[in-house]
Image (tube, rainbow, N blue to C red):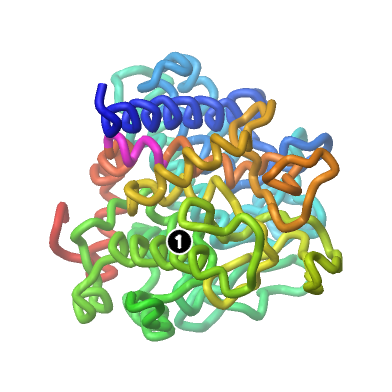
């Protein structure tokens, strides 16, 4: 076997291993009675509705990969959809949702709002994307699969996207029963691309085309390291919407004008991250061509340390980004995996490096969510500090984007979803598979 074939085989084995381990988070951590998925694998963690959306998308992948049977996936999906359909919807502060939207975090058992969190528009969008993926997959002539499709349709039609505009062109970040709408809106390039597509495709509470146009008008294009793209620093912004939608070759007005598409845009952002790690302007330990990946992640905590003569400041959870920061030396392997479809030629060597660093080290669900080589650990491991928790929305992109890279599976599913197709067309997308 030549060297290139051996590398390809090692990469394939690593991807299969990572896909299975990360998928197991949704199998093992879920409340099977209501389908809720914990935000973290920490005792007492509430559910994350975005993680539920990823789980609903992952179950079909699990069936196709042999991780669970179709019957098991159907039962888990039905439990989840029934819960969201039947749970309390209203303005009461302890409800599960309102106006078809759901609170960001829910109690794992009761399903009620926790932490006085917001009714989250974008997290609801990620949930609904998973709901639609379930409807696209469970198409057999079977009473349970028929009920899945009926619940999917009901849940999507109930979301009142117009209400969430609160009189403006763009969509607000959310709402709280105590104070009303949040002051921030989905403006500037961000993870809300999937939100606008879903809102535009709604048959009941459709966003007007002006809403999408207003969002596009707030983009920031930048040229960084010779690469021009619509800028966002954290990698997750360039990934989440792509879990469900195949943006290769389809363009809205903004991308047509620039001669690009959102897939190519994410590719450019991925290469910028690697180039930033190579240049390493802040001099962090462990950054190089095969060690990169800044995104929203946990960090070592709010600390100050003098390391090798340099005063270093570390953060806890923060939306880290390249090249403008914030950056405290914390890298996230999951975010590198999620860029696999965009740039496999630079992602696969990075994953092999993370494997060589032993970033699994007994973790039940694959690589640690984040690590910081600059802040040395008491164990003396070369990866330095490592995150204790696995996080649902970090785990979800791993099996899904690996599968999109290998087979286009989720993308093919969603191309058959009429709501997604309608939303894309109303946003002005054309070309490619459309």
Q: Is residue 347 at all visible to an observer of this figure?
A: yes
Q: Is residue 302 above or below residue 348?
A: below
Residue 81 percent across, percent down from the top left: 53, 35
Q: Is residue 172 left or right of residue 248?
A: right
Residue 360 in which image quadrant: top right
Taking depth in this image into account, of 376 and 244 the one nearest to the observer is 376
Characterize the magenta stretch by its predominant secondary structure: helix
Residue ID at (71%, 73%): 180
Residue 254 percent across, percent down from the top left: 27, 78
Residue 424 percent across, percent down from the top left: 27, 61
Residue ID at (22%, 67%): 251
Residue ID at (73%, 50%): 95
Q: What range of the chain is rendered magenta?
A: 401-407
Q: Is residue 153 at all visible to an observer of this figure?
A: no
Residue ID at (72%, 66%): 176
Q: Secondary structure at mark 1?
A: helix
Q: Is residue 37 left or right of residue 21?
A: right
Where does the N terminus fall, quadrant-wise? top left
Where does the C terminus fall, quadrant-wise? bottom left
Label 1 belongs to which residue? Answer: 274
Taking depth in this image into account, of 372 and 365 the one nearest to the observer is 372
Q: Is residue 146 above or below residue 332?
A: above
Residue 309 in which image quadrant: bottom right
Q: Does residue 177 show up magenta in the picture? A: no
Q: Is residue 90 left or right of residue 281?
A: right
């Amino acid at each position: 076997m030549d060297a290139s074939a051996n590398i390809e085989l090692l990469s394939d084995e690593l991807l299969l291993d990572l896909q299975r381990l990360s998928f197991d988070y949704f199998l093992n951590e879920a409340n099977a009675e209501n389908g809720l998925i914990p935000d973290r694998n920490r005792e007492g963690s509430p559910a994350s509705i975005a993680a539920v959306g990823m789980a609903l998308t992952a179950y079909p992948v699990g069936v196709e990969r042999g991780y669970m049977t179709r019957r098991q996936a159907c039962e888990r999906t039905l439990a989840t959809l029934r819960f969201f359909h039947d749970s309390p919807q209203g303005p009461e502060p302890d409800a599960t949702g309102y106006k078809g939207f759901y609170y960001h975090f829910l109690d794992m058992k009761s399903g009620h709002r926790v932490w006085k969190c917001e009714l989250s528009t974008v997290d609801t969008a990620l949930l609904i994307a998973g709901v639609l993926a379930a409807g696209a997959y469970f198409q057999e002539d079977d009473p349970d699969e028929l009920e899945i499709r009926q619940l999917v349709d009901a849940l999507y039609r109930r979301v009142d996207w117009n209400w969430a505009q609160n009189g403006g062109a763009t969509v607000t970040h959310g709402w709280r029963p105590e104070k009303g709408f949040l002051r921030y809106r989905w403006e500037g390039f961000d993870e809300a691309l999937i939100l606008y597509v879903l809102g535009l495709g709604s048959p009941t509470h459709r966003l007007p085309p002006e809403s999408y146009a207003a969002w596009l008008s707030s983009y920031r294009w930048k040229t960084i390291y010779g690469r021009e793209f619509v800028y966002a620093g954290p990698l997750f912004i360039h990934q989440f919407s792509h879990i469900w939608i195949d943006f290769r070759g389809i363009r809205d007005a903004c991308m047509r004008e620039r001669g690009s598409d959102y897939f190519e845009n994410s590719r450019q952002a991925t290469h910028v991250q690697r180039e930033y790690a190579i240049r390493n302007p802040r001099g962090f330990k462990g950054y190089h061509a095969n060690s990169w990946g800044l995104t929203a992640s946990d960090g070592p905590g709010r600390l100050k340390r003098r390391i090798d003569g340099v005063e270093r400041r570390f953060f806890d959870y923060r939306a880290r980004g390249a090249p403008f920061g914030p950056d405290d030396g914390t890298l996230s392997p999951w975010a590198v995996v999620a860029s696999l479809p965009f740039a496999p030629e630079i992602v696969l060597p990075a994953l092999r490096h993370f494997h060589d660093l032993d970033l699994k080290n007994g973790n039940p669900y694959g690589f640690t969510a984040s690590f910081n080589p600059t802040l040395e650990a008491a164990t003396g491991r070369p990866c330095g500090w490592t995150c204790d928790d696995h996080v649902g929305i970090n785990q979800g992109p791993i099996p899904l984007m690996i599968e999109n890279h290998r087979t286009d599976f989720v993308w093919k599913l969603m191309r058959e979803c009429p709501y997604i197709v309608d939303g894309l067309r109303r946003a002005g997308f054309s070309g490619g598979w459309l």
